[in-house]
Image (cartoon, helix red, strand yellow):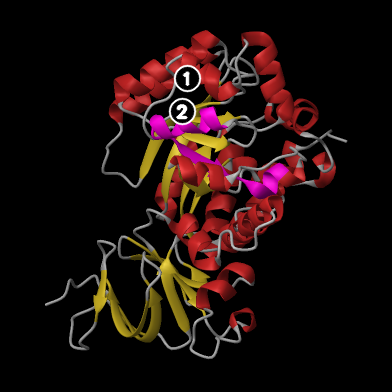
Amino acid sequence: MADDLSVRYRNAVLYDESGHKHVGDVLLHDDGQWSKSKGDEDVQHDLDGSGRLITRSLQNWHTHLAMQLNARDFSDGFPLHRWLNEAVFPTEARLNPEYVRVGAQAAAAEMIRTGSSFAADMYFYPAVTGNVLTDAGLRGLVGGPVSDAALPSHPDAASALDELDSMLKQQNTDNRVQYAIATHSVYLCSEETLRRASELAEKRKARLHIHVSETRKEIADCHEKTGLYPVEYLNSLDFFKPGTVCAHASWVKKNEIRMLAEHQVTAVHCPSSNMKIACGGTMSLPAYNDAGVDVRIGTDGAASSGSGLDMLAEARLAALVQRHDHWDATLLPAAEVFSMATKGSSDWAVWNLDDVRMRPLGRSGNRHLANLIFNGADCLDLWVDGQALRMNGITQTIDEAAAWKELDRAVETYYEGVE
């Protein structure tokens, strides 16, 4: 007898992790596996799957979820360091846990609505974001920010690390939401702070999350100060641990890419953010693939990317910018970029095949993933551990309308007095 938490979709189209298509009656099990249905199993839901496309859910590997609060035009048109120093840091100075809760809740609702079940986040008051994701039924790797400046949640880096040490010591490794140590960057963290963060990661077997080589200015300043480029500098400090998340990693040399591969780092391609704030370069995927680096896709913060948390839109842009930058139309076909965007997922997103953007299906019904990546589609259902976070186009674990209203009210006070 099948697990009574299984869900049956009749007459559906399902793509597995390898990109292979299956048509017919399928069971989605609460442990994340799937199987063909014989039609007589005990299930919690027996659903009409015609007009539905089932895939692994999307994963967003670099976010600042509560920055939904910062998604406003007053910072549009700023380059990165001006954007940080004139727009982001001054407004973030007034952050508090309630603002973070409201921003993270709106972000969680957007994740569910757009078919993402996981975010690797970096933002203040990480326990607040962790609770929001847990209540929403989502997964997360929630990084508590560590830096020597611009920390509204702590007086200094040492106190931020002490809080993370306590959180990491107490966390349950079976929880959907795990915590990480999010050192901001080489330009906001001293050598001592970077070393202490890495030592804490080693002590608690935790992951590190850091912005790396995002802009030409960053690498030039680092080289002028240390004689090394950022990845080289971090490597010289024995900073990297297996699973370290390096966001952006755009302005790097091939020897640095080899260093990332050697340390089993996860590098995150964030094309919309790099392009919106004119970083002048995006990750060179062929070089990363040649070196064997684990590469994922992330949207960055809503204010810096302009794409919010829509991972289908980010995956599309990832494919397009790689082809454009390398003059190679064969790079990142739909199935490959979709694999990057869903890699490691054990959850399921169910898309609307009757959405006009999913048509035509192709002469042999072979355009599902291409349509999904390059055109998009509505997410109808989202399943995590056998729980429906969204069903029939309605989010089950968050009241969307209430979340949007709370966000609007919070933004009114958050930006009070800001021109």
Note whether 121 is above or below 92 in the view shown: below
* Residue pointed to by mark 2: 259
Q: Is residue 404 visible?
A: yes
Q: Position of residue 120 (x, y in %)?
A: 48, 42
Q: Nearer the viewer, residue 38 or 112?
A: 38
What segment is highlighted magenta in the picture?
A: 254-274
Label 2 CA crowd tier, 10 Å (few <14, some 14–19, many 20+): some
Q: Which of the 4 image quadrants contains residue 53?
A: bottom left
Q: Are marks 2 and 1 in contact (CB under 8 Å)?
A: yes
Note whether 34 is above or below 82 in the view shown: below
Q: Position of residue 305 (x, y in %)?
A: 69, 47
The three-letter code of the residue at mark 2 reads Met
Q: Is label 1 in a helix, a strand or a loop?
A: helix
- Membership of 267 in magenta stretch: yes
Q: Quadrant of the N terminus?
A: bottom left
Q: Image check: 176 left or right of 214?
A: left
Q: Quadrant of the C terminus?
A: top right
Dominant secondary structure (helix, strand or loop) of the stretch shown in magenta? helix
Residue located at (20% from left, 87% from top): 38
Q: Nearer the viewer, residue 223 or 91?
A: 223
Label 1 CA crowd tier, 10 Å (few <14, some 14–19, many 20+): some
Give me the disc on residue 327: none
Q: Position of residue 13 (x, y in %)?
A: 41, 81
Residue located at (52% from left, 53% from top): 108
Q: Which of the 4 image quadrants contains residue 244?
A: top left
* Residue pointed to by mark 1: 235
Query: What distance separates the C-alpha of mark 2 from that of mark 1?
Result: 7 Å
The disc, 2 or 1, on the residue closer to the chain's N-terminal end is 1
